[in-house]
Image: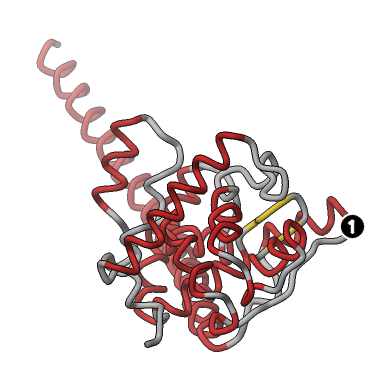
């Protein structure tokens, strides 16, 4: 009797393993088309991003997700596209000095700045101008991991297709410079009533100093802290001009 019971248990185990294998095979069969469609969808999304990057190398972005959302919130935003050659060189140098002093030296990521920002516990500071352009033009605001992952993937792609001059030109035209003001043409007009080609070094440094908090800082009515930060930026702008770190976006 014991032997018959043992044989029955053995047959039950074999039957269970066979049923489990059958279920596994069915799941794999169901997953194959799902996986194929997911990969296809990812390829389409990647293709769209690459196509937009190539397109905006030659065509100015008509808007960005953030500018569009702010225009809906406010009803109107101030913005006027200005080619890089029409900006005062000191405006471009001030922005680079404020946001990404090694802009000409890296390929999209400043590893030293990222490491320093992480050690300091800063939410901002390690992000390059390249990364900010990718976030502003192609993605959404915030600090979510999906957004950061896409930013990390798209930044080197943009570096392949865009020149440093183009990256900086787009940044100067899409960065928020005040509540409802986008680009440094709008910022210069609102704060100082000047065209971007006639801005002074002091004005350029004050405008660049508002970048971390454009809704909370006002270049036209600077606090003591903002004036101090502007002086630091002005010194940095002079330094990168002298040591050659502005060479990739300035035409001699």
> Which quadrant does the C terminus fall into?
bottom left
Q: Is any atom of residue 103 visible in this view?
A: yes
Residue 143 sits above or below residue 83 on the image: above
Task: Provide residue 168's location: percent of width, then percent of height.
Answer: 48, 71
Reading the image, the residue beneath label 1 is 75
Task: Provide residue 236's location: percent of width, then percent of height.
Answer: 38, 55
- Please give left or right for residue 128 compared with residue 185 in the image: left
Q: Label 1's element?
A: loop
Query: Nearest the camera: 158 or 130?
Result: 130
Q: Residue furthest right?
A: 75
Task: Provide residue 119's location: percent of width, then percent of height.
Answer: 28, 32
- Please give left or right for residue 49 compared with residue 35 in the image: right
Using the rendered view, name the quadrant where residue 246 is placed. bottom left
Q: Is any atom of residue 99 visible in this view?
A: no
Residue 54 sits above or below residue 213 on the image: below
Using the rendered view, name the quadrant where residue 152 is placed. bottom left
Query: Nearest the camera: 120 or 16?
Result: 120
Query: Nearest the camera: 10 or 142?
Result: 142
The residue at the point 57 percent across, 50 percent down is 211
* Mark 1 nearby-residue class (10 Å; few <14, some 14–19, many ≥20): few
The residue at the point 81 percent across, 61 percent down is 77
The residue at the point 72 percent across, 69 percent down is 194
Using the rendered view, name the quadrant where residue 238 is placed. bottom left
- Please give left or right for residue 34 compared with residue 192 in the image: left
């Amino acid at each position: 009797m014991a032997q018959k019971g043992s044989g029955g248990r053995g047959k039950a185990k074999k039957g269970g393993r066979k049923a489990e294998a059958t279920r596994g095979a069915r799941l794999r069969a169901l997953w194959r088309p799902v996986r194929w469609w997911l990969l296809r969808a990812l390829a389409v999304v990647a293709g769209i991003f690459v196509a937009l990057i190539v397109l905006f190398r030659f065509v100015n972005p008509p808007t960005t997700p953030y500018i569009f959302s702010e225009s809906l919130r406010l009803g109107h935003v101030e913005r006027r596209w200005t080619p890089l050659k029409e900006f005062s060189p000191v405006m471009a140098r001030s922005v680079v000095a404020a946001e990404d002093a090694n802009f000409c030296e890296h390929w999209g990521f400043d590893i030293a700045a990222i490491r320093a920002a992480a050690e300091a516990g800063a939410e901002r500071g390690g992000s390059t101008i390249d990364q900010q352009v990718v976030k502003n033009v192609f993605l959404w605001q915030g600090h979510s991991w999906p957004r950061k992952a896409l930013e990390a993937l798209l930044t080197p792609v943009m570096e392949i297709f865009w020149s440093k001059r183009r990256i900086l030109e787009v940044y100067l035209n899409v960065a928020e410079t005040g509540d409802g003001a986008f680009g440094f043409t709008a910022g210069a007009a609102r704060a100082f009533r000047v065209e971007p080609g006639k801005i002074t070094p002091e004005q350029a440094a004050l405008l660049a100093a508002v970048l971390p908090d454009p809704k909370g800082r006002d270049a036209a009515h600077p606090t003591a802290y903002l004036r101090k930060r502007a002086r630091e930026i002005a010194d940095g702008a002079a330094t990168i001009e002298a040591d050659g770190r502005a060479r990739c976006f300035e035409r001699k």
